[in-house]
Image (cartoon, rainbow, N blue to C red):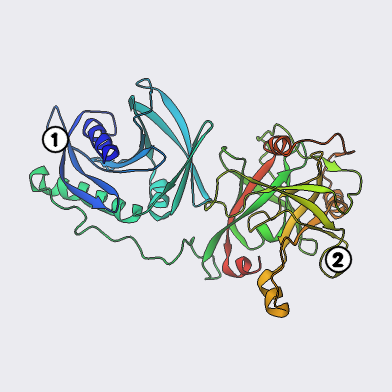
Amino acid sequence: MWLKSFVVAFVLQMGVVGANAAGPFGTVNVGNWIGGAFSNDQTGAFSHCAATTPYANGVILVVSQNAAGTWSLAFASPSYRFNKGESAAIDVTFDGQEQARLYATAYQSNMLTAIMPLNVVRTFQKASLMVATAGRAVLNFDLTSTGPVISALANCVSKVKADGLDKAGDFTKGAAKPAATTEKQAASPAGGKPARAKSGTGFVVSTGGHIVTNHHVIDGCVGDIKGNLTGEAAMVLRVVSSDANNDLALLQAPSTTTFKDFARIRDRSIRSGDSVVAIGFPYHGILTSDFTVTTGIVSSLSGMRNDSRFLQISAPVQPGNSGGPLFDSTGQVVGVVTGKIPALRIAVATGNIPENINFAIKTGVLRDFLDNSVVPYQTTEPKSELKTTDIAANARPYTMLISCNATEQADAKR
């Protein structure tokens, strides 16, 4: 309760432009969100409608719409110590897909407030999870009830402007209900089938910003294919070439983009039993917004049915790891993660559930693909072994989340 009391006290003081406010008048009470209408403390005129909810991470979200229709999102905490007028850029990612950069200002020492464009408001209203990144701080927010609370706040502004503060009541009554959806879907492409958000992993292999991923990661994408490094804004990627047979694709970042580093490909064959490290973005938006790191060994130098294009590895991978780099113990790329054995199908056929059977495309196939695409990649001999933490740190500047909206048919092929 102290968190809610803390934020209500701040809502009383803030408007979108930082004016002191009085209230609440009427109520907004949706799930854990509470709030109402507020007036300017000096003029008595209606200022804004706002609602707030506390989180276990110690941060409180405040969503508001002012009398002019402008939306804002604020992050408050009793532990914050900002100078008034201090500004910060906050990158927000919704459900691991939609991304935006908000520019926030400290109107109060314990609160950062940012204007939300309408497209961000719509995404915020529909999303289930928001990841906010500011500098090195990464915070997750479960967006339960954001759909009805946005509707209630819009109803609050509309009713107060029409009827006045003295008639303020329960603003959740009569609020327009958000469109019912069974799952998050993008607008339908021309073929009529709805598009779904999908994601995978890629890694930069040249100074020119060439990015390797799997063909199946971008197969069926409608609209833009986006890529972003952890904690950085997304960029639109261009498809250079794609090889469905070998499950490889080559993307390119905008010419204005610069990368601090890129991956080097091992110039010597790896052996069965050698240690490997897989890095990628599994279940992005559900798990961490950062990449994950898993370790294992090369279990076999061939894939299913002795397919020599693949390595079999024991490092655990999940949906979203596809297209990510597989490293040896010296931090050199030895493969491109492509998938895992279909455990349920094998279990049905054999009665046993297979464990730790995953696959990566060998560097020989990768190098042929890059050569055909005329990419100036670099190879290197294995050097001294590194700690897994160092391999992960070295990979951070060039390991990228790849995302797009794709047709249901394409999503089913994954």
Looking at the rendered structure, the secondary structure element under dot 2 is: loop
- How far from the left and from the top, in percent, is residue 127? 43, 54
Counting residues from the start of the chain, the first of labels 1 and 2 encountered is 1
At horizontal 51% and vertical 67% (from top left) the residue drawn is 194
Along the line of sight, the residue nearer the viewer: 295 or 68:
295
Quadrant holding the N terminus:
top left
From the viewer's side, name the closer residue of 298 and 130.
Answer: 298
Res 73 → quadrant: top left
Single out the residue that lies furthest toward the left: 166
Tell me residue 169's x, y (percent): 13, 51
- Residue type at mark 2 is Asp
Tell me whether the residue at label 1 lies in contact with that at label 2, contact meaning CB atoms closer than 8 angstroms.
no
Q: Percent position (x, y) of residue 274?
A: 85, 49
Measure the C-alpha gap from mark 1 to mark 2: 73 Å
Say if 85 sits above or below 112 in the image. above
- For label 1, the SS is loop
Res. 233 image quadrant: top right
For the image shown, how many numbered marks are present on the structure?
2
- Of residues 16 and 322, which is closer to you in this image? 322
As drawn, 31 above or below 343: above
For badge 1, the amino acid type reads Ala
Which residue lies most toward the top here?
Answer: 83
Left/right of residue 134 with respect to residue 60 in the rendered view: right
In the image: residue 133, left or right of residue 224: left
**Left or right of residue 381: residue 90:** left
The disc placed on residue 45 is 1
Query: Dot 2: few (<14), some (14–19), or many (≥20) neighbours within 10 Å?
Result: few
Name the residue carrying label 2: 307
Q: Quadrant of residue 268?
A: top right
The C terminus sits in image quarter: bottom right
Residue lying furthest bottom in this view?
349
